[in-house]
Image (spheres, rainbow, N blue to C red):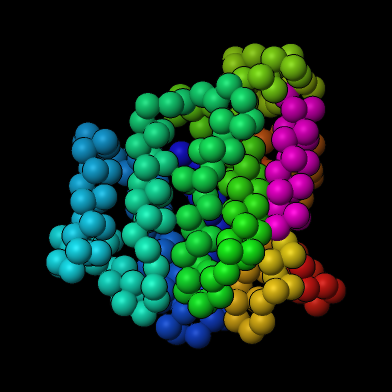
């Protein structure tokens, strides 16, 4: 699957450099877990489904008061002890990758949003717990931010995902814009695919921006870090726009410097 936090894979290292050590440790454990689960779902040489289920069993082992057997789950122990994080977000990230082993196309945008509830939104839930900023209102806003981040990353990775046999562009949208699946394997995007990517990027930004008010409800390190995630997603959308909405050559992703520049500009200019 495209990496969930998603923009988040790039944003985590940026945020970790400036945060207090304990928060860095907690977010680093989340980052390592999410990345490991994704790597198992995408690249594990053995039986991926079996390995993902072993990860889920180890999460249950942790929450049932037993010692985890897998290093990546053992790495969650300090974070889970410090914060009242339920087991469901970790299991949902695993479920998203199990879903990827069975589903490689999405008919509608609504189907893709359902997938994002497993692949992206749990990350935001853990982040809110790490900063001790959990409220129902913030969870709703965080879900919109995380969904927007996941969608933008899907559009960055269209060619890479297609090479793995996965298409996250909704089939209904592809038909509407006159895009065939064979178009996703070309060196450059066709005019029709560019138009579709622009449409989907605008839609992802609508989710991201509608959730960005979350930043204005926060203070301190939480505000700074989550602003980084939001503006990392905006930087990713900027990259797609600069590429002419052609992600196929793999040049649409922003650099760490571009993310940091966007983050700094938006943080100085406005809270969200």
- In the image, is residue 14 part of the stretch drawn in magenta? no
Please give the range of residues in magenta. 193-211
| Residue drawn at x 57%, y 81% as measured from the top left | 18
Out of 236 and 128, give the one closest to the viewer.
128
Say if residue 193 shows up in the picture: yes
| Residue drawn at x 19%, y 60% as measured from the top left | 61
| Residue drawn at x 51%, y 67% as measured from the top left | 127
Depicted 141 relative to depicted 29: above or below? above
In the picture, measured across the screen, residue 161 lies left or right of residue 249, that is: left
Q: Main secondary structure of the magenta part?
A: helix
In the picture, measured across the screen, residue 181 lies left or right of residue 46, that is: right
Q: Position of residue 46 (x, y in %)?
A: 21, 36
- Quarter of the image that includes the C terminus: bottom right
- In the image, is residue 198 part of the stretch drawn in magenta? yes
Depicted 61 relative to depicted 216: above or below? above
| Residue drawn at x 69%, y 26% as measured from the top left | 188
* Residue sitting at the far right: 269
Say if residue 162 shows up in the picture: no
In the picture, measured across the screen, residue 167 lies left or right of residue 263, that is: left
Q: Position of residue 8 (x, y in %)?
A: 55, 57
Q: Position of residue 51 (x, y in %)?
A: 23, 43
Out of 22 and 126, give the one closest to the viewer.
126
In this rendering, the count of numbered labels is: 0
Out of 187 and 212, give the one closest to the viewer.
212
Q: Position of residue 239 (x, y in %)?
A: 73, 48
């Amino acid at each position: 699957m495209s990496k969930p936090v998603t923009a988040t894979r790039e944003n985590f290292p940026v945020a970790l450099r400036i945060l207090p050590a304990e928060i860095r440790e907690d977010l680093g454990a989340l980052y390592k877990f999410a990345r490991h689960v994704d790597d198992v779902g995408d690249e594990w040489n053995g039986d991926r489904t079996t390995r993902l289920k072993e990860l889920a069993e180890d999460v249950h082992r942790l929450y049932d008061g037993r010692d985890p057997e897998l290093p990546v789950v053992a790495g969650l122990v300090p974070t889970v002890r410090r914060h009242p994080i339920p087991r469901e977000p970790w299991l949902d990230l695993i479920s998203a990758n199990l879903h990827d082993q069975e589903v490689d196309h999405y008919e509608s945008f609504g189907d893709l949003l359902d997938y994002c509830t497993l692949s992206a939104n749990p990350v935001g839930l853990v982040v809110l717990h790490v900063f001790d900023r959990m409220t129902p209102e913030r969870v709703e806003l965080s879900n919109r931010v995380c969904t927007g981040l996941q969608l933008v990353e899907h559009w960055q990775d269209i060619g890479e995902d297609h090479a793995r046999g996965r298409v996250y562009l909704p089939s209904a949208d592809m038909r509407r814009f006159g895009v065939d699946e064979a178009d996703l394997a070309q060196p450059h995007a066709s005019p029709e695919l560019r138009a579709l990517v622009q449409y989907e990027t605008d839609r992802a930004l609508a989710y991201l921006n509608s959730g960005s008010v979350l930043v204005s409800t926060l203070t301190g390190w939480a505000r700074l870090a989550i602003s980084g995630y939001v503006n990392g997603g905006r930087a990713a959308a900027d990259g797609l726009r600069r590429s002419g909405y052609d992600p196929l050559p793999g040049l649409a992703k922003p650099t760490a410097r571009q993310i940091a520049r966007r983050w700094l500009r938006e943080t100085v200019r406005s809270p969200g």
